[in-house]
Amino acid sequence: MGYSRKEVKQQFATIVKEEIDNFIANGLLDNATTSLDDFEAALANNSDVPSSPFVFPKNMTLEKYAQLVQLYRGGKKEYLIRGLYAPLLLPWVKRFAKDDRLMVMKFKDVFNASIVDEVLRFAGVEDTSVDEHYDDFIRNKHPTNKGVEMPLDPTIRLYLKFLYQPFDKFLVQLLGKGW
């Protein structure tokens, strides 16, 4: 028995609320001036929606966020912290230098057969006989969602867009345009 769209939305909204509280407790946010419920109500009523429902700590650097992310303890799930790509990548970029020793790719590209050649070239591997095995990997090993795929609720997506916006700017600073 699966969950209805409404149940999935409610469950995910609960996770978002809990993790926003954890972000505040861990210093990643100063405050959430508008709760997800209030944000959704404002959108539904065509009321004024704040420019951002979040107040971020002033003068925070990517380095400081990276330290906070490393220390973060948000509970069982920690879904939202996984979207803070720049603070998570910073230690790797510092250690390996992004240009020649660290390859960063978008998750959506990982299961694209053409990425195999790119990764092999980056790693300095000339034999690309892996290609014939890659299709088998995708077909048989790649985990798939056995349930019905449900897109993220547009209101939650917009709310999270506000949350990730400053971190996305850090990602562009860290990796360059195109991110």
Image (cartoon, rainbow, N blue to C red):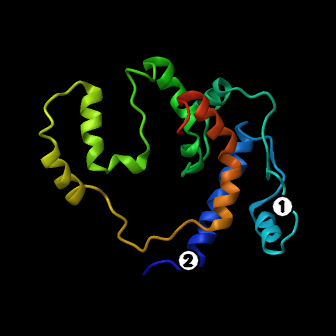
Residue 49 placement: quadrant:
bottom right
Which residue is painted at 74% across and 28% down in the image? 60
Q: How many marks?
A: 2
Most distant residue in the right direction: 48
Give the structural element (helix, strand or loop) at label 2.
helix
Examine the image and state in which quarter residue 16 appears: bottom right
Residues at marks 2 and 1 touching, judged by CB atoms closer than 8 Å: no
Give the residue number, with chain letter if any, for mark 1.
Answer: 49
Q: Is residue 177 left or right of residue 124?
A: right
Res. 17 visible in picture: no
Q: CA distance from mark 2 to mark 1?
A: 25 Å
Task: Between residue 41 and residue 30, name the one nearer to us.
Answer: 41
Q: Residue at x 59, y 34 (%)?
A: 172
Name the residue that disc number 2 marks. Answer: 5
Question: Of marks 2 and 1, which one's residue comes earlier in the chain?
Answer: 2
Report the amino acid beneath label 1: Val
